[in-house]
Amino acid sequence: MQFWLLFLIFLWLAHALGYLVHEYAHTITAWMLGHKANPLALTYGRLSAKNLLFLSDIDENVDYDPILAAGKGFQASLIAVAGVLFGNVPFYFISRRIFSFAKARNRQMLGLFAFLLCLMNVGNFLDYVPVRTFTTHSDMARVEAGMRISPWWIATVLGLPFAIAIWHFFARLLPDARWFLFPQRRVPQTILVVVSSFTMFVYFGSAGMDGYGEVSRWISVFSVCVLFPGALILCWPRIREQKTPARVCVQARTQR
C-alpha cells in the first residue's frame, strides 16, 4: 500500500515537473530574447483542486501578438517551440539517463521516478505533434505563423523523432521498467502498462479533442480508440514471461 501511495506521489511530481519545465522554457526563451521582463512570471491560476492536481490553469504568460507585429516571426516561433524543444526534449534524455543509472545500481525508487518523468516528457511530444499541430492556435500554430510554414513541416521535422521516442518508450523502456521494478510480478507489471498507455494515449493523446478543430479532434480520437488499446495489447505482460527468468539473466550478463 505504501508503495502505491508513493507511486501516485511520483506520478504527480513527474507530471508537474514535465509541465513546469515546458512552461518555463517558453518564458526563459522570451526573456532571453527581450520579450519578457521576468522569466519566472507564469500565470499560475487559481488555488483549486483541479489546478493543484493537473496544473491546468498555469500558462506561459507570453504575449505573441507584439512580437509578430514587430516582424520578429522567427523569435515568436522559437519561443513557441521552446516548451517542447528546450524543455521536454532535454528532460526526456535526462530521465532516460537517470533510469539507466538507477537500474545499474538497483535503486528502484529512483528508477520509478525517472521512468514516470520520461513518460510525462514523451507525452508532451505526442500532445503537441501531431495532436495539436493542425490547428489555428496554441504553440505549434504560432511556430507555423511565425515561420510561415505548413503544419506538415512541423509534423515531419518534429513528428519523426517524436514518434521514434514514443516507440522507444513502449518497445524498450517500458519492458525494462516492468522487469526492473516488478520482476516476475504480473499484476504490478500490468498496472504499470495500463498507467503508461492511458497517460500517453488518453491523457496526452486526447488534448485535441475539444477546441482545436476537426483534424486535431480526429487525431485524438485515433489516439484514444486505436493507439491506446493497441499499446495495451502489445505491451500486456504475458504469462510465459513471468515463468521464465531468462530475460533477467540475459540482462544481468549484458550489464557485466
Image: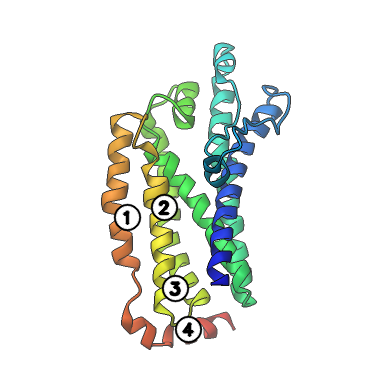
The correct choice, above or below, for 63 with respect to 44 in the image is above
Question: How far apart are the two marked residues, 1 and 3, measured between alpha carbons?
Answer: 19 Å
Q: Residue at x 46, y 29 (%)?
A: 138
Q: Is 130 on the left-hand or right-hand side of 87?
A: left
Closer to the chain start, of discs 3 and 2, is 3
Q: Secondary structure at mark 2?
A: helix
Disc 2 residue type (three-letter): Met
Question: How far apart are the two marked residues, 4 and 1, measured between alpha carbons?
Answer: 27 Å
* Residue at mark 2: 200
Quarter of the image for residue 68 reads top right
Relative depth, front residue between 255 and 132: 132
Question: How far apart are the two marked residues, 2 and 1, measured between alpha carbons?
Answer: 8 Å
Q: Secondary structure at mark 1?
A: helix
The correct choice, above or below, for 131 with respect to 4 in the image is above
Closer to the chain start, of discs 3 and 4, is 3
Closer to the chain start, of discs 2 and 1, is 2
